[in-house]
Image (cartoon, helix red, strand yellow):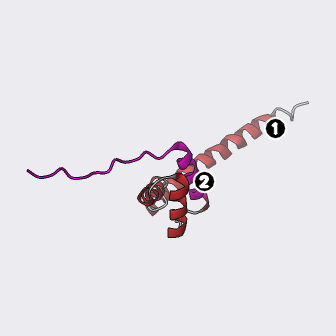
Amino acid sequence: MASPSFCPTRKRISDEAIERLNAFYEIKKRPTEAEKDRIAMECDISLAQVNTWFNNARSRRGDTNPKLAQKLLKQQIAALNNQVTLLQQHHQQSSSGHDSF
């Protein structure tokens, strides 16, 4: 009979650790090995978890997929253009009401 394989249980990353990881990510998307070691110690998680978290964060946010990043930028530009159009319409409506005396 084969012995059961050893699978270490995964430790969930705390909300505080996720906040620290997100804060660091905003500053630097690709930390050095020394920075990852320090983050792992500060967050009380493994180096593997730090590596995985940063890889997943870059993927989720489109930082490793140029086509996804381009798509997200196009969506943001379209949303901003819509806001500009609405503001222009609002401005035209409000200024046309002030012309009649």
Residue 72 sits above or below residue 36 on the image: above
Is 79 in front, or is 57? 57
Is 99 in front, or is 18? 18
In the rendered image, the residue lying farthest to the right is 101
Q: In which quarter of the image is residue 25?
A: bottom right
Mark 1 to mark 2: distance in Å? 44 Å
- Is residue 4 on the magenta stretch? yes
Q: Of label 1 and label 2, which has the lower sequence position?
A: 2
Q: How far from the left and from the top, in percent, is residue 74?
A: 53, 54
Mark 2: secondary structure: helix
Q: In which quarter of the image is residue 46?
A: bottom left
Is 87 in front, or is 35? 35
Instruction: Please state the extent of the stretch shown in magenta in the rendering.
Output: 1-26
Q: Is residue 12 left or right of residue 75?
A: left
Q: Name the residue under label 1.
A: 95
Q: Which residue is drawn at 53% across and 43% down?
A: 15
